[in-house]
Image (cartoon, grey):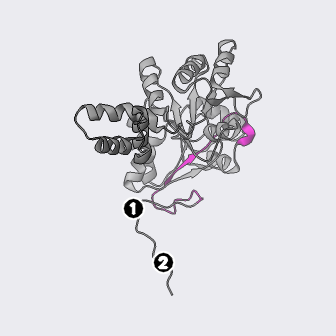
Amino acid sequence: MDGPRQPDIAGSSVGAGTESAGGPGQIVLAATPIGNMGDATVRLIDLLQSADVIAAEDTRRLHRLVSALKITPTGRILSYHEHNEQSRTPELLDLVRSGAVLLMVTDAGMPSVSDPGYRLVEAAAAEGIPVTAAPGPSAVLTALALSGLPTDRFCFEGFLPRKAGERAARLDELSAERRTMVFFEAPHRLEVMLRALDAAFGGDRPAAVARELTKLHEQVLRGPLRELLEWAETSEIRGEIAVVVGGAGDAAPEAPEDHVEAVNALIAQGSRLKDAVATIASDARISKRELYEAVLAARGTQP
């Protein structure tokens, strides 16, 4: 008997290899080391040597990478960064349509994750051009794993806005976020960032600052936001920074007594006691019976 029929989904499926088999080529997003060159995968090294085209966020950084790995690329090297993504994407897609294997790398970690690459993948996916990945080092996952904070649910927020008002608005949106949050920050702005986190989330919120991950001077500090802020205020901070913040805890359950005043306000506007209790209890998601009893208790009467 035939097996279950697979859904017909628009898109493409690409294997682990890099051969184009005479048809359209493919795009390979490859993760590069975030610090320790020993983290370069065998597949990354093979791709750097064999890809027809390498699109690099910074070609100088690429040359330093291949020099450290003692390899020599044979393909064409092109720059691909935030300032030329829009103009260069069509050129790269043309190369892939003609059968080229295009390797996309950024300065460190996985392309398109807080780095160039998203526009290229979006455009390729819209045309059904094959895209795959050569996974590897990730600053986001490394910081999360080392933070000592819950990892079952998390979100990546990247860099916060630089302007104080926009930063405060973003953090206000995140103040009730239950998942562990991962941020990036520049060392010279870390103190300002931690002060904003302290103000928005409270100084007792657990967090971790991860600095120079996988490098010689790797450092991970864990503690309440207030303590991390005090450390930042008195330290000379260098290197690349990831900040991990614990999610908001369970809110304290509301007591029926907290809503007696709201019930009385509706009664003053003409509502009956029963109707006012039902309305407020529904909005606050508390027991109607307990709220009714609280209102009577506040009046000094018994149900």
Helix or strand or loop: what does disc 1 sit on? loop
The front one of 249 and 222 is 249
Q: Which residues are magenta?
A: 16-39
Please indicate, yes or no, whether residue 211 appears anywhere in the rendered image.
Answer: no
Q: Of marks 1 and 2, which one's residue comes earlier in the chain?
A: 2
Residue 247 among those drawn in magenta: no
Label number found at residue 10? 1
Write the residue at 42% across / 19% down.
165
Rendered view: 23 above or below 93: below
Instruction: State which quadrant residue 236 falls in.
Output: top right
Label number found at residue 173? none
Locate residue 263, reporting x and y percent.
34, 35
Give how far apart the Cα atoms at labels 1 and 2 are: 18 Å
Please indicate, yes or no, whether residue 226 appears anywhere in the rendered image.
Answer: yes
Residue type beneath disc 1: Ala
The front one of 188 and 284 is 284
Write the residue at 68% across / 41% down.
145
Please give the count of numbered marks on the rendered protein. 2
Q: Which residue is mark 2?
A: 4
Locate residue 226, reporting x and y percent.
64, 21
